[in-house]
Amino acid sequence: MINKNTLFDKIWSQHSVGQRSDGRHLLYIDRHVIHELHVPHAFKRMDQSGRAIRRPDLTVIVQDHTVPTKPGLELISDHIKITREYAKKYQLKLIDVASEQHGIVHIVSAEMGFAMPGYTLACPDSHASTVGALGCLAFGCGTTELEHILATQVMVLDKPKQLRVTINGHLMPGVGAKDVSLYLIKTIGVNAGKGYVVEFTGSTIKEMSVEARMTLCNMSIEWGARSCLIAPDDKTIEWCSSRQFSPLQNPGFNANSFWANLKSDDDAKFDLEIELDCTNLCPQLTWGTDPSQVVGINDLIPDPQEMHAADRSLATKAMSYMDIDFGQRIEGLEVNRVFIGSCSNSRISDLRAAAQILKNKKIAKHVKAIVVPGSTQIKKQAELEGLDRIFLDAGFEWHRSGCSMCAGANGDIGQPGERCLSTTNRNFENRQGRGVKTHLVSPEMAAAAALAGRIVDVRNYL
């Protein structure tokens, strides 16, 4: 009999512990990575209940959200202090702000090899799905769920439905994974993935680097997906081979034997299929205050009266907040601030792409621009390649790793009324500072806007 299992089916069945009487499932969790915002409450509950951590060796704590990234700013938050105390008490691995391994949780988990093909992973953060790019099935969880996972090493879940998104077409210069992500959300809406685990496939995905795939998987949460996966290939195995905690570091581990079957079988059945052609895709950016309010760089801002009734009031409200109007060209709007960073676009490939645009140039005098590498290791690699000098000479601030302006819990925020081009994943009202008008873009688009002092088509700067 020919198997017709999806990649999700295979990972799920290997980790399924059982099903409860209420119909919910118990899924074994191979690794859990925790950031400092959730540690105080979750571990306080552990103390109060007297429960022990079942597998301390599979638990990692990362400090990223409340970490100040500006050089010379040494403010240590209560969350960081409490995290250190609990890590010591429970003898857990801590990626401290002072560590050489420090960085954003979703970047560090892949960079260090905590997330690997075929693993399950839980993280108390919505963008846990980033590591789906490696074929790792990751779920975001709440604080109460985190306590349960720490004590039992299983997560209670309703089994998700399955959605395959096939993306085809060779991307043109100046167009990348961020543009694909924004175009996808614009096309299908912010709720299209609700209740689904998504598998990305197609020629566009095959051409993408592993790091570009991480951007795509990171943004899947912005259209409601429960998690996502990309089947590991030769690129994945090569990327994973040098990671500290990768099983590939074990002499007896053969990736071809263990990971070769980590793909959907021919004729595997999905609950829903979506196809997207990105052959002629141009650079994309958000015009409004949710990630589906997107236009191509050469397009006009849409008329709310031409939208579905449910979207009209949201669009009108967004236009008021963003100080724009329908029928207006988004290209040419003045920019006050540029931010390159976050778990969406702060990997070494992102920094290289932005630096290529900025090399031997100066940003506009009225623009405040900062770049925040996703991890200390990425920062070191960038400095080894001289990318920091390119950013600094152009007029950018060069910061330490952390969530920075994406989280806004660390002192890195914009000023009221500023228009900001940001490589983050969320453009909600007040997300990057009260009254800040955020447009989500790729690193290349952000760099070009910093030079021009206004929104421009990066293809003219290549």
Image (spheres, rainbow, N blue to C red):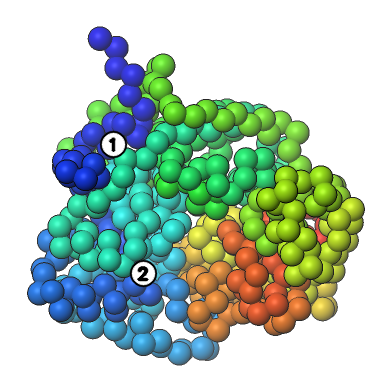
Alpha carbon separation for disc pair 2 and 1: 25 Å
Three-letter code, disc 2: His
> With respect to residue 300, does 428 lie above or below?
below
Q: Is residue 281 left or right of residue 152?
A: right
> With respect to residue 387, does 293 lie above or below?
above
Q: Is residue 402 left or right of residue 439?
A: left
Q: Nearer the viewer, residue 158 or 237?
A: 158
Three-letter code, disc 1: Ile
Q: Position of residue 386 (x, y in %)?
A: 60, 65
**Image quadrant where residue 453 sits:** bottom right
> With respect to residue 180, does 108 lie above or below?
below
Marking on residue 35: 2
Residue located at (29% from left, 48% from top): 157
**Image quadrant where residue 334 sits:** bottom right
The kind of secondary structure element at disc 2 is strand
Marking on residue 11: 1
Residue located at (82% from left, 78% from top): 366
